[in-house]
Image: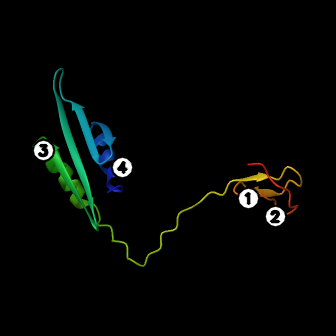
Amino acid sequence: MYDLIPLIEAWLEQEGFAVSVLANRIEGVKKTGFLSSEKVTLFLEDYIGLCSVKIQGQTNTCTRLAEYLKSLPIKAPRSERETIIREREIVTMPCPYCKTLVSITERKCPNCGAYIKG
């Protein structure tokens, strides 16, 4: 689902819509005249292995948007064995005594043995 949101947002902006995204809801509004505008709303629901998109708005825009979504390649589902690795940032600070970089979670410097105030 989260892969679709930027694609839908870009398509709507290309079509001249002002877009707002709130969680799984995307709204687009386009001025069509002095006192008239066109509005389209999409609701995305994430399920295991698939995503559902419900479109509300003018028929012409909804049809074109549905055709665009159908033209997107299907993303292969992740296998159960696939390992997801996330980057972590380890924050360090210099030891006040020997200046060795020490993780902020450490209470004692591994180089000089000094106790570190956290």
Residue located 68% across and 54% down the image: 91
Which badge, 4 or 3, is on the more N-terminal residue? Answer: 4
Q: CA distance from mark 1 to mark 3?
A: 61 Å
Which badge, 1 or 3, is on the more N-terminal residue? Answer: 3
* Residue sitting farthest toward the top: 34
Three-letter residue code for mark 4: Pro
Kindly indicate whether the residue at mark 1 contacts the one at mark 2 (C-beta within 8 angstroms).
yes
Kindly indicate whether the residue at mark 2 contacts the one at mark 4 (C-beta within 8 angstroms).
no
- Judging depth in this view, the residue of 99 and 60 nearest the camera is 99
The x, y position of residue 102, in whole percent, is 77, 57
Kindly indicate whether the residue at mark 2 contacts the one at mark 3 (C-beta within 8 angstroms).
no
Would you place residue 108 above or below residue 17 in this image? below
Which badge, 4 or 1, is on the more N-terminal residue? Answer: 4
Q: CA distance from mark 4 to mark 1?
A: 40 Å
Q: CA distance from mark 3 to mark 2?
A: 67 Å
Q: On residue 56, which mark appears?
A: none
Residue located 81% across and 64% down the image: 110
Would you place residue 3 above or below residue 23 in this image? below
Kindly indicate whether the residue at mark 3 contacts the one at mark 4 (C-beta within 8 angstroms).
no
Would you place residue 98 above or below residue 35 in this image? below
Say which residue label 4 marks. Answer: 6
- The quarter in which the N terminus is drawn is bottom left
Say which residue label 2 marks. Answer: 110
Q: CA distance from mark 4 to mark 2?
A: 46 Å
Q: Residues within 10 Å of mark 2 (few under 14, many from 20)?
A: some
Q: Secondary structure at mark 2?
A: loop
Q: Quadrant of residue 98?
A: bottom right
Q: On residue 60, which mark appears?
A: 3
The x, y position of residue 54, in whole percent, is 18, 51
